[in-house]
């Protein structure tokens, strides 16, 4: 199985991929629902967190 960090980096750096074609989904245990994030909202990967570029910088653990 390919780690999520590798897949996210492939989308970002592979010229054959268009990041605008992707959405990332995660389950928020506090809200108890599935959340969708357009790939273009991802600011970066830091350690074991996905960092979102929104009004407040948001860190989502992998």
Image (spheres, rainbow, N blue to C red):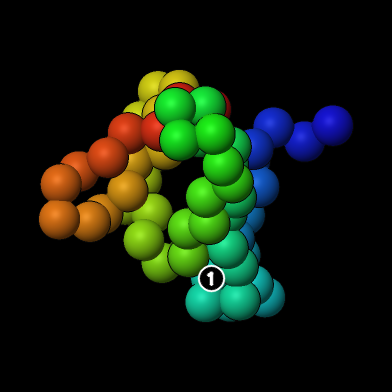
Q: How many marks?
A: 1
Q: Is residue 47 visible?
A: yes
Relative image position of residue 57 (x, y in whole percent)? 20, 43
The residue to which callout 1 is attached is 19
Farthest residue in the front direction? Answer: 32
Q: Nearer the viewer, residue 46 or 15?
A: 46
Q: Nearer the viewer, residue 33 or 17?
A: 33
Badge 1 crowding class, 10 Å Cα cut-off, few under 14, some 14 to 19, many 20 or more, is some
Up-down relation of residue 55 to residue 50 (above or below):
below
Residue at (36% x, 61% y) in the render: 41
Which residue occupies the extreme right position in the image? Answer: 1
Q: Residue at x 52, y 77 (%)?
A: 20
Quadrant housing residue 18: bottom right
Q: Which quadrant, please, contains the N terminus?
A: top right
Q: In the image, 1: left or right of 27?
A: right
Residue located 77% across and 36% down the image = 2
Asked whether, in this view, residue 54 is left or right of residue 35, the answer is left
| Residue at x 22% of width, y 56% of height | 54
Element under label 1?
helix
Q: Nearer the viewer, residue 30 or 24?
A: 30
Classify 59 as above or below 9: above
- Residue 16 image position (x, y, % from top left): 67, 75
From the top left corner, tell me how far across and down residue 15 is, in percent. Answer: 59, 73
Quarter occupied by residue 40: bottom left
Q: State whether residue 9 appears in this view.
A: no
């Amino acid at each position: 199985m390919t780690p999520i960090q590798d897949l996210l980096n492939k989308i970002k750096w592979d010229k054959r991929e268009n990041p605008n074609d992707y959405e990332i989904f995660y389950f928020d245990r506090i809200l108890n629902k599935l959340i969708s994030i357009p790939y273009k909202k991802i600011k970066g990967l830091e350690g074991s967190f996905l960092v979102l570029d929104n009004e407040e910088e948001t860190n989502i653990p992998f």
